[in-house]
Amino acid sequence: MSVHYTLNLRLFWPLVTGLCTALVCLYHVLRGDGAARTEPPDGADSGFPLLKVAILLLLGYVLLRCRHAVRQRFLPVSSRLVGHSAFSPRHLSEPGLGILLESYYEHEVRLSPHVLGHSKAHVSRIVGELVRAGRIRGSPGPISGGALALAFRGDFIQVGSAYEQHKIRRPDSFDVLVPLRLPPLVALEPRSLGAEPALAPAFHSCFVCALKAPPSPSGTSGGHWLRNCKPFADSFCVDVHGQRHLSATLVLRWFQSHLQRSLATVRYKLEECCRVSLTPGGLEQPPTLHILPCRTDYGCCRLSMAVRLIPAVHLGDCVFLVAPPPPPSPVGPLSELPGGLRSEALWGVNTARQEQKLLGWLQERAAPGACYLKCLQLLKALRDLGARGLDPTAATQWGHMLSSYVLKTVVLTVLLHEGTAGPGWDEAHLSECLEELVQFLKACLLGRQTLFHCVLGPGGAAAEVGPLPKVLREAAPVDLLAAFDLHTRELAAARLLSTWRRLPQLLRAYGGPRYLARCPPSWSQRTQGFPEQEP
């Protein structure tokens, strides 16, 4: 994937100013080493004072920094823009919108490839040391070593937007899967819950994993196998319908304890380059590894980073079950499950590798200069702009409904519907492409379109770019927005429409050097829901 480097004006002009000042100082120092100057009779200085040079350089720097803000302030934008429909061609043809989008992308959205590369390499080194220590240390607890021990497989898999080239703003958060190695005597029989009629739509993307005996040529009886596996089943399994199922809650609890022990063995070694700490996520979130730069670290990318370490069980073909499963609703705990199904037995599925292959497959067939990843980044920025002014509860609900995964699925669905990113996705049509994505997302929120998971189900698009386990091919299609009621989705659609309508004003208020300016208080009065937070 090609990376385009652009001039960073925030760094360029201060460097030019400092270099010019240093040259002037050097000139005066060298000049002072020569013969003393003869002052004119009237006392005037025949040379050019250093203070005047510094003031002129500073004034030039301030003028250059203000140039972008002045251009944005005086862009010709029609006063009738707010009165038109949010998706009218007249809105998209306004001359200022494309410039504002490009400016906002460069100043607030685009991530420096240099900083991102350093951050990913740093995370890879730290997590690699931790995982290797966990694999060598073995399994603590009631099953210590032996054929029934749960252990780290020894590798890790980096997933998420930072590794798919569409992360925005700061490279300070990452997701890493840590595959686990099951005992040789244990095999899993995963089953999708997407076809359960009595189950709420929020749980249709979850899986359960029953224990079964692995195929054995010796023909060992089932009762003998159960007796041999009893220590493992008692430590990591729960009963569902009279059958032992691998518990995501118990595995997550063991995983967090094992990480703490492993970190204690490598903490001293890692202190040479950073400070690390581990925050347990409880039973609802995976643990987070916090990486802080040392005080003696004078590298160019001194960032504090948070890395979510997610325990994963390999199903085959780079598909993993993860613990815990994604939250089924924006607020509140897991609801009661019917038919004796226990929440501790629920697993989520991670298909990041298939989605990465799908993005690569699309890029190979895309026209040169296609901007679909840039549109995805701007769509995330649009979501963040829409969350401004919301109270914490509404902002959390808004973020869950328009999560990064949902927005990525929107882009993939639109591209796959068109077959590929053709000439219409060129940089010159950035506004039109972004409008198409917003319009499709609005239709999905209002129920006019269904936003299906890209991998799960027989119609999964990622099956075209690689094999999938049978359990995923036979799973029922999953609607990513089915967990939210229609009223909440209508409010979100209205909020999205209002944010899009006021996009030029929002970009002027929050983009470029004037990012800290407050947003006009009237922009959110058209949301028809999602109550505002009082200032």
Image (cartoon, grey):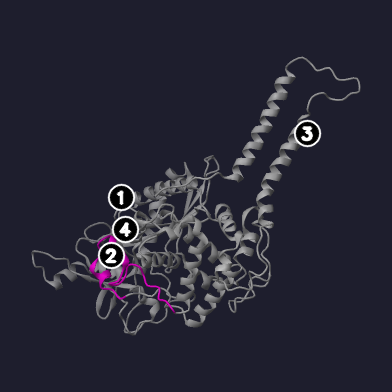
Which residue in the structure is indicated by mark 4? 179
Q: Which residue lies under the disc numbered 2?
A: 463
User: How far is disc 4 from disc 1 in space, using C-alphas?
Assistant: 15 Å
Earlier-in-chain disc, 3 versus 1:
3
- Indicate which disc, 4 or 1, sits on the residue closer to the N terminus: 1
The x and y percentages for residue 224 are 14, 70
Sequence-wise, which precedes: disc 2 or disc 4? 4
Q: Which mark, by number, is residue 52? A: 3
Q: Amino acid at mark 4?
A: Pro
Rendered view: 120 above or below 208:
above
* Labelled pair 4, 1 in contact (Cβ < 8 Å): no
Q: CA distance from mark 3 to mark 1?
A: 66 Å
**Mark nearer the N terminus (3 vs 2):** 3
Q: Which residues are magenta?
A: 448-476
Q: Callout 4: helix, strand or loop?
A: strand
Residue labelled with disc 1:
136
Mark whose residue sits in front, 3 or 1: 3
Q: Is residue 241 magenta?
A: no
Which numbered marker is on residue 528?
none
Quadrant the C terminus occupies: bottom right
Of marks 1 and 2, the one in the foreground: 2
Label located before the other in sequence (4 or 3): 3
Residue 298's spot in the image, x, y percent? Answer: 54, 39
Task: Tell me which residue sits at (59%, 61%) in the image.
Answer: 97
The amino acid pointed to by label 2 is Ala
The crowding category of the residue bearing disc 1, from other C-alpha atoms within 10 Å (few below 14, some 14 to 19, many at least 20), is few
Nearer to us in this view, 173 or 59: 59
Q: What is the quadrant of residue 89 in the picture? A: bottom right
Q: Is residue 53 left or right of residue 439?
A: right
Element at label 2: helix
Q: Is residue 62 above or below residue 150?
A: above
* Mark 1: secondary structure: helix
